[in-house]
Each structure stands twice: as structure tokens, then as C-alpha cells.
Image (cartoon, rainbow, N blue to C red):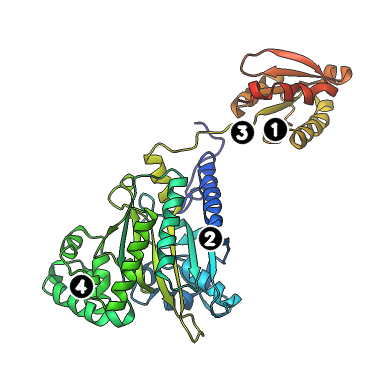
Amino acid sequence: QERNFVMSSATEPLPGTSDCWEPEVLDWIELETAAREIFHRYGYAEVRTPIFERTEVFVRSLGDETDVVQKEMYTFTDRGGRSLTLRPEGTAGVIRAVADRGLEQGEEARVFYFGPMFRGERPAAGRRRQFHQVGVEAVGNDSPWMDAECIAMLSHFLDQIGVTGGKIKINSRGLPEDRPQVSAALAEYFTPHAPGMCEDCQRRLTTNIWRMLDCKNPACQEVAAGAPDLVSLMGDDTRAFFARVCQSLDSLGVDYEVAPRLVRGLDYYIHTVFEITHPGLGAQDALAGGGRYRIVLPGAKKPVEGIGFAAGMERLLLARASLGRQTTAVAEADIAIISLGENAILPGLRLAQELRATLSGLRVKADFTGRSLKAQMRGANRSGARLALIRGDNELAENVVLCRDMTTSEQQSVPAADLMAWIDERRTTLFA
């Protein structure tokens, strides 16, 4: 395709970012619309938080030893000397917002969000440095039934957008009091294997041994597959909580499998953790995930508990595409206004505005270039218009509009006073 400018590095988006045009934009809108519809049914309200926060919001919430904090955050110092970070995930900022607003004893906050997140990881299919998430948080409820409803809501949302064929995996991260015995069992298992594992896992053996279960290195995954069953090492209260979650999912008819070594990558999780994988994503098949968490925010005296999940919107679109669910190109215009000569341009502008106010749902594009009829008709064709409305000096003098069906090339002179009724009568056939 010819362009009237020269491409250079200055005009390209940075690695790990991208520009988004229609029709892809329409796919994004469809995801957002479906999310609002489904989440509203469950009593969730939309919240919008800043894309950057004080760095401590994420470090305290996610954990010092997570890969996100250690390797991936975009952190900078502002002019006031404060350390700020572009949000790498949505939960910490949402919890900070809930805490700022205040939550009375026994109250709940159920919210959902969309927006860009930022991580300095290597770009790959469905993984960008600026990526987008849709997520939910139910804060202030410690019930296992809430965990089950949250997973069911995620499943409902995926069905709504046509992403079928995913697999729900669940496990328990346990409570803080369960961690010593689980960590000891993991250390006993992994220590003999550590010399043959990746550098990150060798470091995690002494800093965050649970993350060895979450390594993406194939050789490390093979070792982790033989690790102990986490839930079997946990206390009675933890096992009872997890049993209630599974019982609830069974009651709701939600298909799932227990993944005994699923841990998720962030340190704030307790009790239920879950993940949805999809075969349409290839080797890195995680589509969405979440779990129950307990977060102590800077300056807070008590932890905040909740349950939530997030799904990468780029990955949702990839999964939809693998199933043949993509929006086809939409015409730039349904109706093209062609004005021939200087005298016709202002009347063309008024006509376009009148059509937009009267004929809802139709796209109207006016040509103000003053080019020849032939050139403007080529432009109307490229825009996908189904109807061209043409006026020059003669049509203005006679107070008529020349209406040309762009599909059949038939045209008819219609009195200007009758134009709206004429279009409305033919709307079904012209713009089907």
C-alpha cells in the first residue's frame, strides 16, 4: 500500500506496544460491553484508578521477591522526589482506592475495571509491555461461597464473549500459618533438584520457594510436577475452606479441575487460587487468573481481604480469534455527501449534520475537498458507503438531491424536503 510519508523508527510504536485500529477496536468494545453487562448482573460497579501509584503500593502488596517487583515494574522518580510506578496489575490500586474511600465493618465493595497495565517483560504473542486487563475485586467478604461465585462469574463472562474450550484450574494457597510446613516440604523436595534448574529457581529456593512451582522454564516445570500436593500439607481450616469452594462449584455446575501445584505469581494470595487456560494461546496458555488475597496497605493497621481475577484483553482476543470469532471490517460511512463546487460545501455540511441527528445508527461522511465528481465517488467507494448524496449548483437551484445507490449504480433525483422519508423507506434494503 502506497503512503505519502516515509516510515521511520520515530513513527513506529515502541517494542511491546501497538496501535489499535478498527475493526480490532470493535472487538475491544465488544469485550468491554460484555463485561459491563455480566458484572453488573452480579452487583459489581465500575471503578477507574490512576495508571501510576506510589511504588510502595505495589511492593507492599505484591511482595519484594515476586518477578513483577524484581524485574518488570516501570518505576521512576518524579519532580517531587517520590518513587512512582506504572501499575503492573490492577488489584493493588483498586484496594488502595477502596481503602481511601473507606469500608465500614461488615461492608463489601464489589468493583470491576478495565485499563492498561505495564510490565517490562519480553514481548511475545499476547504479552506486551503495555497490555490491558479486565478484572474484578470483591472486597470485604471472607466467604468461600464468594470465591465460587467469582469463578462462576468469570466462566459466565467467557461464555458471553464466545471463548469456549477453556479449562478452569483451582488450588489453595493456604493461610500464613500453613506456610512454614509447606515451605519445609517444598525445600526438602526441591533442594536435590535445584542445581539442574534455572538461575531464577536456584535463587527462589532461599527467597520464595513457592514460586519454583510457577516457573515457566520447561525443565523446571518437569521437576515441579513431582512436588508435594500443597493442600494435603495444610491445616484443617484451610482444607475445609477449599472443600466448600469445590462443593459450591459442583452445585453451580461449573467444570473445574484441582491443580495441586498451582500457586499464582503474587505473594498476597491466601486460600483459593485459580487459573483458566485455553488451547488457542499456544504454549503460554494462561487466559485469566485470580484468587483470594489479604493485603496490608502502607499506613493501614489491618489487612484488607477480598477475591478477584483479571484477564488479559489481548489474550482474550487471541482466544476468540482461534475460535473464528473476530469482527469483520466495518464501513467508514454508510452515506457519503458529495458537494460539487464551492457553493455546495456549506449546504453539504448542514445536510450531513441533519442526517446524523435524524438517522441514528448510520455513519455519514461529507467530502469537503472540492475535488471532481469522479474523485469524490472513488473516495465514497473506498469508505464503503452504500448511498451517495450529490449536489452541485444545478441541484441547489432546483432544491433536489441526486441519490445514487453505490451497489447498483442507480440514481434518482429526490426533492430535498422528501429526502429523509426517502432514505428511511429504503433503509432496510440499502444498509442491510
CA–CA distance in space, label 2 to label 1: 33 Å
Q: Please tell me in which quadrant of the rendered image residue 60 appears.
A: bottom left
State the image coordinates of residue 240 (x, y, percent, origin top left): 31, 73
Which residue type does callout 2 highlight? Tyr
Residue at x 49% of width, y 66% of height:
137
Which residue type does callout 3 highlight? Glu
State the image coordinates of residue 345 (x, y, percent, origin top left): 80, 29
Q: Which mark is residue 332?
A: 3
CA–CA distance in space, label 2 to label 3: 30 Å
- Asked whether the viewer can see residue 200, the reply is no
- Mark with earlier residue (2, 1): 2
Establish if 63 lies above or below 413: below
Residue denoted by label 4: 202
Count the marks: how many? 4
Residue denoted by label 2: 113
Residue denoted by label 1: 364
CA–CA distance in space, label 2 to label 4: 36 Å
